[in-house]
Amino acid sequence: MTDPADLPLDDVDHAILDRLAAIHTLLDPPPGDLDERVSFAIALEGLDAEVARLSEQQTVGSGARGTERTRTITFDSGSRAMMITVSEHQDGTVRIDGWLAPSAPLRVELRLPEPAPLRAVTADAAGRFAFEGVPHGIAQLLVQPPEGGALPRVVTPAFVL
Amino acid sequence: MTGVTLGSGGAGTSQAGPDRAARLGECLERARNGEMGALGEVVRELNPLLWHVARAEGLTAEESADVVQTTWLELLRRLHDIRSPRALTSWLVTATRREAWRARELSRRQAPDGAARLESAPDPEPLPGERLLSDERDRALWQHFQRLSERCRTLLRIVTQAARPDYAAVAEALGMPVGSIGPTRGRCLAKLREMLLADPGWRES
């Protein structure tokens, strides 16, 4: 007698599998903005980029009663680490203070969803840079390589400000 | 675009077969030619699968979302080597597992009590119970599903989020032996099916 496990999938099997998929979608759905965040993050020009993985995230302060809430995010790529502090302003915008390690006066770009234009600053010799008046929402940072070098640019995942 | 459709099936319930493969293949080709927007459709199609791969590795929701996103970013540099939608699915599942493992190691090292985290990490968080399921047959299905081994639950949880023709490729990318599922039933589904067919609550309603 044939082992039931060796039979091809039939309609009953597909009915079971389809319901299982639906139950898992119901009980543990992906975040509603996951598709949007991924699509935004990968809509880059050109394919050559080194990914800086999110390695640590900390929030300080509650933001209540006028205390400023700040969040520190650390990204790490093979060639460079980047730490940013995100501070919320009363006017509804945020400020990003960043630091590249190893430090280098590189061009740092802040990508926001269209139609917002790409913003760019150059880090100082100590690797520090800042973006002021940034709207809430998703964002992504890119660090351009030193000119003439063979290193690719570094990109972070999209994160929510 | 951002809404979550509750109660809908995985990719397996819709547009399976050659049409889907051709459609995704065309999106890949357009992306290779620089039209990155074409990947949006591929992302929507495969994100639920990758999400469950990361969650089944025991990551939190936030960690899983980051891992899925990092995996897609890593894909960009490999885009020219990946020719078919099935190869893409396999690559993404394998890469998501690798990223999830990396993320788990990282949070274990950062945890104040690393040892405790090490012991608790590999077990996926228990999903909320069947009280959320309004349909009686779904509750019966869920109860029997819980009686499968953890390995079988992981396999079926993830594979059912893939398109039907990709079941075997996804099982293989998960490190399961050939014949785990697709095109044949495999042991995990055969066991679940046997329990369900013996349950009047599932068969008759």
Image: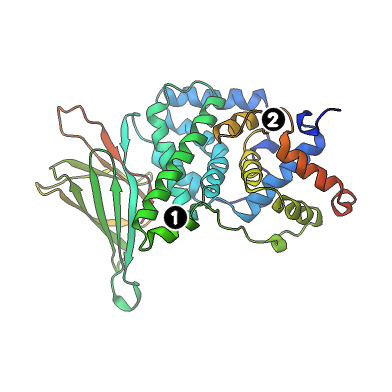
Secondary element at image label 1: helix
B116 above or below A159? below
Which quadrant of the structure image shows residue B113?
bottom left
Q: Amino acid at mark 2?
A: Gly
Secondary element at image label 2: loop
**Residue B70 in view of the camera:** yes
Which quadrant of the structure image shows residue B183?
top right
In this view, the mark in front (2 or 1): 1
**Percent of width and height locating residue A150:** 20, 27
**Residue B8 in view of the camera:** no
Residue drawn at the location 55% of the way across and 53% of the way down: B124
Quadrant where the N terminus of chain A lies?
top right
Which quadrant of the structure image shows residue B81?
top left
Reading the image, the residue beneath label 1 is B118
Callout 1 environment at 10 Å: few (<14), some (14 to 19), or many (20+)?
some
Q: Nearer the viewer, residue B119 or B138?
A: B119
Q: Give the alpha-carbon distance from disc 2 to disc 1, as whole Å.
A: 34 Å
Q: Left of A26 or right of it: where is B29?
A: left
**Percent of width and height locating residue A86:** 28, 59
A56 above or below B38? below
Reading the image, the residue beneath label 2 is B182
Labels 2 and 1 within one chain? yes
Q: Amino acid at mark 1?
A: Leu
Q: Nearer the viewer, residue A105 or B71?
A: B71
**Percent of width and height locating residue A144:** 22, 37
Circles 2 and 1, Cβ within 8 Å, touching? The answer is no
Callout 2 environment at 10 Å: few (<14), some (14 to 19), or many (20+)?
many
Q: Nearer the viewer, residue A126 or B108?
A: B108
Q: Chain of mark 2?
A: B
The number of discs equals 2
Residue drawn at the location 14% of the way across and 27% of the way down: A148
Q: Left of B14 or right of it: where is A54?
A: left
